[in-house]
């Protein structure tokens, strides 16, 4: 017990000491994150409160719907917690920098397991807990639950967290033990691809296009009734639902049985996890230190192809681009995310292809072009999501070797623009594919296709510049995982700036598009005043794109030039 307390005390002191060095920038970061978190918290509460209030007003099936929703909420939280614990446990037990020191100290494996278990469960569960509280609060207020409901909820949540944490830790222990580290990445990649296929099939089996088909509205209730929510008595999420349902819906469940079932299962998984940990940890940790393979980036065909494509550029630019591409090919952490993004894009395009626009009561011409214009904003948002994951971290990925680049003859301006153009073309291609393909599928007018194509091209300049510029303004050269760069304060600021930029451009173009299509619907020519208004708004949108293209790069270059390394 003393060793566990020492391990936790050391971790608490490290967090405390790191917070002491925070300056005004750190305070701003905390304020922004806290504000966004509180707004999201209240938004979640209001949404669930409205939905549950509506359910409570429905006779007969209202409580059933609310109960099914609660079961889905617990199942979602359970899945998120297991996934989060797997990712966190990989770092906590195998990759963390202090493990070499800890494994050399006379600390028992049981104490190391317990100390890291507590750290793991805190790091992986606090966000889910924070955003689950408004959901349970909404249930309690709508169904006028007593204080006993909230006390029981605490007794349910604790073993619920123990089960998910222990399952995640056991899973990662076995994976690292069975597969060498370099093959574990490939296994995760394969699992991600299978997950993509599963998600795609799940969405297609739901047939979402039927919900916008006016001729099948009478089937909607049957359609919803056929959406089966998992209610297996063998999963902990259903035990948690059954344990608190009597306080909300007056169900005659044996709540004491389910609470004891949760606690006994949670403690059993913790003990099983410790038993496995003490027998395989050292060997698994040793395997986790193996170097990663990089067969693809070393292939002669790939190298020859890259050198041929980059031959027109200067030697400095060519060296930077080749280094970035090879780094990406060697980092298998990013491949599963790339596959997932590609799958989401395919689903995005496919769903547009099955929209029965010709059956809508609205004029087809109007609806086609309205959806095409809305699609412009959605596609730009998809590209910004791609950029925050792959473009924004590009400067930070230089890591601790950034000082080599800064002290080399390579100018920072050339470094920044080299990264800009590589990322720009990598974003422009999927952006244009998204826009052109979906517009053609919706039979949009030539005017709308050309406007969307040109606009998304211009916005890609701004989105890329924001990613590279803000990535240089908020660099993070000391991170254990690439995903930490995109999810930090800088990544949050980038998404706010990118979404604001996209929203402003779409708003500025909304009026010209409206005027043009209203003239077509009314079969009347545009007046001189309307033409002037269209020209002015499009000119302002163009100026906004130019500013978004130039200013972030300028600020990013200035920031890097002042940075001490």
Image (cartoon, rainbow, N blue to C red):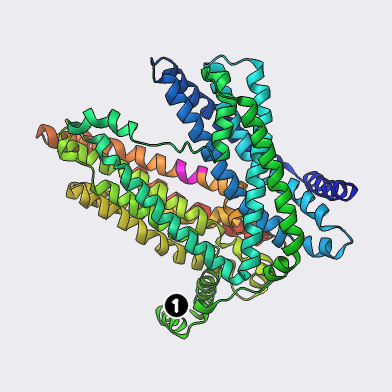
Q: Residue at x 56, y 58 (%)?
A: 393
Visible residue check, residue 549: no
Badge 1: residue crowd in 10 Å (few <14, some 14–19, many ≥20): few
In depth, the one of 39 and 357 nearer the eye is 357
Q: Foreground residue, 488 or 285? A: 285
- Image location (x, y in percent) of residue 301: 43, 84
Q: What percent of the width, then of the height, locates residue 364?
A: 15, 37
Secondary structure under the numbered disc 1 in the rendered image: loop
Which x, y percent locates residue 354? 23, 46
Query: Quadrant location of the C terminus?
Result: bottom right
Query: Residue lying farthest left?
Result: 523
Q: Main secondary structure of the magenta part?
A: helix
**Residue 29, horizontal then vertical, whole percent:** 66, 42
Q: Residue at x 15, y 39 (%)?
A: 358
> Magenta span covers which residues?
496-500
Side (left or right) of 377 relative to 123: left
**Which of the two residues, 381 or 130, is positioned nearer the viewer here?**
130
Q: Quadrant of residue 225?
A: top left
In the image, residue 560 sits, relative to residue 181, either above or below, namely above
**Residue 327 visible, this angle:** yes
Residue at mark 1: 313
Q: Is residue 205 left or right of residue 460?
A: left
């Amino acid at each position: 017990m003393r060793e566990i307390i020492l391990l936790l005390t050391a971790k608490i002191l490290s967090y405390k000491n790191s917070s002491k060095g925070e300056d005004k920038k750190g305070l701003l970061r905390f304020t922004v994150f806290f504000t966004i978190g509180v707004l999201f918290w209240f938004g979640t509460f209001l949404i669930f409160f409205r939905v549950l209030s509506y359910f409570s007003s429905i006779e007969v099936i209202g409580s059933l719907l609310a109960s099914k929703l609660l079961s889905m909420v617990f199942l979602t939280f359970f899945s998120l917690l297991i996934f989060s614990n797997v990712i966190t446990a990989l770092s906590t037990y195998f990759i963390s920098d202090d493990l070499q020191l800890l494994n050399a100290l006379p600390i028992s494996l049981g104490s190391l397991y317990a100390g890291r278990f507590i750290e793991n469960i805190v790091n992986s569960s606090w966000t889910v807990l924070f955003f689950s509280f408004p959901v349970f609060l909404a249930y309690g207020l709508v169904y006028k639950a007593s204080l006993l409901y909230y006390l029981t909820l605490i007794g349910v949540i604790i073993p619920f967290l123990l089960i998910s944490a222990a399952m995640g830790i056991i899973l990662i222990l076995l994976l690292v033990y069975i597969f060498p580290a370099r093959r574990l990445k490939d296994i995760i990649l394969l699992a991600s691809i299978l997950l993509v296929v599963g998600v795609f099939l799940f969405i297609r089996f739901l047939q979402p296009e039927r919900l916008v088909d006016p001729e099948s509205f009478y089937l909607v209730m049957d359609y919803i009734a056929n959406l089966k929510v998992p209610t297996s008595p063998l999963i902990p999420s259903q035990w948690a639902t059954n344990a608190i349902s009597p306080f909300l819906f007056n169900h005659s469940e044996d709540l004491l049985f389910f609470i004891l079932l949760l606690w006994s299962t949670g403690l059993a998984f913790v003990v099983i996890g410790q038993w496995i940990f003490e027998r395989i940890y050292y060997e698994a940790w040793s395997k986790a230190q193996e170097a990663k393979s990089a067969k693809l980036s070393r292939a002669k065909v790939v190298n020859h192809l890259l050198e041929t494509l980059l031959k027109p550029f200067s030697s400095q630019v060519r060296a930077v681009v080749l280094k970035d591409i090879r780094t990406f090919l060697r980092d298998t952490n990013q491949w599963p995310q790339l596959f997932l993004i590609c799958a989401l894009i395919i689903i995005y395009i496919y769903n547009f292809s099955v929209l029965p626009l010709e059956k809508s009561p609205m004029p087809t011409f109007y609806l086609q072009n309205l959806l095409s214009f809305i699609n412009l904003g959605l596609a730009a948002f998809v590209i910004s999501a791609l950029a925050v994951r792959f473009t924004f971290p590009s400067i930070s990925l230089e890591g601790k070797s950034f000082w080599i680049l800064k002290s080399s003859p390579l100018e920072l301006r050339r470094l920044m623009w080299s990264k800009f153009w590589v990322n720009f073309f990598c974003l422009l291609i999927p952006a244009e594919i998204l826009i052109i393909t979906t517009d053609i599928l919706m039979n949009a007018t030539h005017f709308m296709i050309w406007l969307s194509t040109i606009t998304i091209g211009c916005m890609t300049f701004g989105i890329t510049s924001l990613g590279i510029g803000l990535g240089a303004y908020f660099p993070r050269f000391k991170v254990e995982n690439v995903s930490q760069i995109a999810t930090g304060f800088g990544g949050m600021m980038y998404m706010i700036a990118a979404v604001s930029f996209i929203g402003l451009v779409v708003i500025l173009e909304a009026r010209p598009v409206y005027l043009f299509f209203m003239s077509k619907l009314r079969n009347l020519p545009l007046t001189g005043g309307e033409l002037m208004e269209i020209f002015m708004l499009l000119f302002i949108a163009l100026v906004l794109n130019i500013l978004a293209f130039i200013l972030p790069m300028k600020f990013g270059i200035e920031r890097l030039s002042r940075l001490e390394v």
